Structures are given as C-alpha cells and as structure tokens.
Image: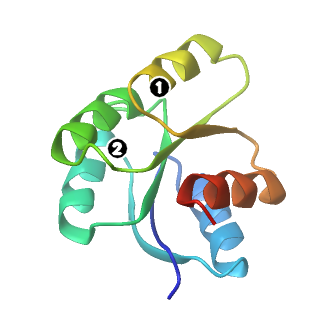
Amino acid sequence: MANRILIVDDAAFMRMMIRDILTKNGFEVVGEAQDGSQAIEKFKELKPDLITMDITMPEMDGIAALKEIKKIDAGAKVIMCSAMGQQAMVIDAIQAGAKDFIVKPFQSDRVVEAINKTLGA
C-alpha cells in the first residue's frame, strides 16, 4: 500500500510540484492544505503517514502547526520545507519535532530520500 502524504504549502505551484514528485515515485497524496490551521484539520481528518510542511505561511506558520500536530499525535512524521536562508527556522522546526527538512526549489531525489528515510523504508 502506498504511503499516504499530506502536502502543506501556501503556494499552489509548490504543492503541485511536490505532488508531481510524490505521485511519480509511488506515494499517495491524500490531501493538501494552504496554511497551518488547515494542516491541523486535514491531519485529524485524513491521518496521513507523513506531512510535508512549508515553514512560512500566512495565518499559522509551519512551526506552530507542527507543534499542534505533535500535541495531537506525538508520533506524527513531518518534513519541513523551506527556502534557502531560513536556517534558524529549520533549527526551530527540528527542535519542535520535525523529522527532516527539504530546501526549495525541490530536487525530486532529495524529496524522495527524505520521505523514505522518515518513513523508515
């Protein structure tokens, strides 16, 4: 059975790019969210195996959403996505419980590697 993944990013183009990478590599994209509060609702509803989470989003950022998701399920697997130059935020995300991070623009082999590593494949 394919691993079920939730994509969270405020940019539709980025969601489309990562969805494309995931589906081409045999993962099932079960949902998408465009901000942190949507991510929390979708997480509760869909129970994905893994979440790719953008750090910088309107309404609620990825780190705040990550902390809330970890309260719901301490075992949740989240990979943060960030643009170059956000090292401090990446450190905050890892401390908050993120399993890994991928830098934008996405390189498909790095995305797949991070997901496989996080899911223990």
Q: Residues within 10 Å of mark 1 (few under 14, many from 20)?
A: many
Name the one closer to the observer, 36 or 51.
Answer: 51
Q: Can residue 89 be spotted in the picture?
A: yes
Q: Is residue 73 left or right of residue 94?
A: left
Rendered location of residue 52, percent (x, y): 51, 51
The type of colouring in the image is rainbow
**Which residue corresponds to the image point at 50% horizontal and 26% vertical from the top-left?**
94
Q: Is residue 14 above or below residue 5?
A: above
- Element type where label 2 sits in the image: loop
At label 2, the amino acid type is: Asp
- Element type where label 1 sits in the image: helix
Q: Residue 8 bears which disc, if any?
A: none
Q: Is residue 43 above or below residue 47?
A: above
Q: Can residue 7 be spotted in the picture?
A: no
Earlier in the chain: of badge 1 and badge 2, it is 2
**Which residue corresponds to the image point at 38% horizontal and 25% vertical from the top-left?**
96
Rendered location of residue 115, percent (x, y): 62, 57
Asked whether disc 1 touches disc 2, contact meaning CB atoms under 8 Å apart, the reply is no
Q: Is residue 10 above or below residue 28?
A: above
At label 1, the amino acid type is: Ala
Residue occupied by mark 1? 93
Residue occupied by mark 2? 35
Rendered location of residue 36, percent (x, y): 31, 41
Name the one closer to the observer, 105 or 99.
Answer: 99
Total labels drawn: 2
Name the one closer to the observer, 59 or 62.
Answer: 62
- Among all residues in the image, which is located at the extreme bottom? 1
**Which residue corresponds to the image point at 62% horizontal and 37% vertical from the top-left?**
101
Q: Residues within 10 Å of mark 2 (few under 14, many from 20)?
A: many
Q: Is residue 9 left or right of residue 114?
A: left
Rendered location of residue 46, percent (x, y): 26, 70
Q: CA distance from mark 1 to mark 2?
A: 16 Å
